[in-house]
Image: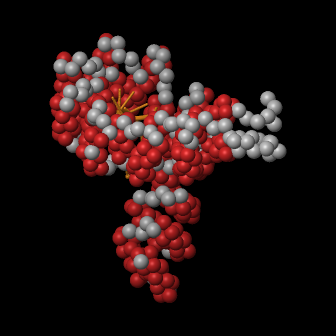
Amino acid sequence: MNPARPITTFRLASLLRLQKDPKLALKLFKNPNPNPKTPLKPIPYSLLSYDLIITKLGRAKMFKEMQEILAQLKEEIRFTSKEALFCDIINFYGRAHLPENALKVFDEVPSFRVQRTIKSYNSLLNVFLMCKDFDKMRELFVGIEKFGKADACTYNLLIRGFCTSGRIDDACKVFDEMKKRGVSPNVITFGNLIYGLCLNLRLTEAFKLKTDMVKVYRVYPNAYIYASLIKRLCENGELNLAFRLKEEMIRNKIEMDSAIYSTLISGLCKVGRKEEALIVWEDMKVSGCKPDTVTYNVMINLFCKDKDFEAAYRLLDEMVEKGCKPDVISYNVILRELFNEGKWGEANDLFEDMPRRGCSPDVVSYRILFDGLCNGMQFKEAALILDEMIFKGFAPRSASICKFVDSLCEGKNEDLLWSVFNSLEKGKIIDVDLWRMAVALALKDDKISSSFELVDSLIDVVN
DNA sequence: CTAGGGTTAG
């Protein structure tokens, strides 16, 4: 294709679709004609191109850039966007835990000449569910009539909110109201209620609801519902019942999926029945159910508990081969066990290799590393990691820091102690316990001047 | 992706 040829509307959209890198996609969108000598013509944007670039930027959390394009879209009068685009945007802000921005987008939808329905309203409800702001959910629900009639999805979101916050009885009230308003509960409704009952150890009621949903409502349980029940049974140590449910699924021709296998394997593993776990793992493969990242993580955990790191690494490779990406949990499981075994050097290597393997360490990774290095008396390395994690905005557990500071005091490692407090100060994470330690430390210190310095800097932090 | 399950850590 001739690169100098001015780009067409259609080609811009397909190039945008193919461009995986959001930054490059944005560059392409802003400057679609690659040849600078081509005289500037009106750029052929289509609604599809806007959709593509906005969702790419939103997915990448590049919100400033996304808003820029949105402002441009608002001026386009050749076409009107679909409500679904705004549902996406609201969802992106929710995932980034920016509920205020989501609310703002929701408010601005009419200025794009787009009518808001219950769909974008539900997206907004979901944002506050993701942010666990249940009061705000309730508040939103009160003003619902402006946008339409609450549908099954609306009620399911509310029920979910109550279930995850342990307020099962409130969830049941919403369920009753839903029925009263003539909205039929669906399999997701029952899934949420059963999930909540299992979470709150009300297993008898969960099983009763599983029966009633069929008898009374003619809605049939699916794998989601079985997964909640099986998990709870495993945690109660009732593995035989859990396997009876698995048999029931097969009998009722409900397709077994990876979640069911993950739950069963993990359940067996937790009570030390490793051989049976391995049998289920083989059974899964034979039955043609593909393991996903979670299933692999369960298996990696199993091998790690067995101190079989070779097998764990093999599974990591197998995941990559099968196109199933190891995630941060895959690595955290291995890291934790490497430290438990005192292999802190190997753990450090794996940790440093994570970004190269396309997985950024999270707060758990850093905590594992920090605690592991402290336990292994690798204080210098621990101080480095502490500074790095604080720089990235991850907070170590308070107990870990106290223990660390304690060890440094005992070892009279003043230089390191000083740098640790400096790091903590940068992250503004000095709490009362650390204060007490610092003051005690300052009072015991022979070098009066440096103690004063320390206390002064701590006072700065508070002010 | 307007809504749901299962894995690590604490």
A108 over A412 or under it: above or below: above
Residue sitting at 79 percent across and 44 percent down?
A39
A397 over A219 or under it: above or below: below
Q: Which quadrant would residue A45 be assigned to in this image?
A: top right
Left or right relative to A279: residue A30:
right
Q: Nearer the viewer, residue A130 or A382?
A: A130
Q: Nearer the viewer, residue A35 or A39?
A: A39
Quarter of the C terminus of chain A within the rendering: bottom left
Report x, y in % for residue A114: 44, 39
Left or right relative to A304: residue A35:
right
Residue sitting at 39 percent across and 74 percent down?
A435
Residue A454 appears in the rendering: yes
Q: Nearer the viewer, residue A372 or A434?
A: A434
Quarter of the N terminus of chain A within the rendering: top right
Q: Nearer the viewer, residue A78 or A256?
A: A78
A94 over A426 or under it: above or below: above
Left or right relative to A450: residue A132:
left
Q: Which quadrant would residue A119 be assigned to in this image?
A: top left
Report x, y in % for residue A275: 41, 25
Report x, y in % for residue A95: 45, 45
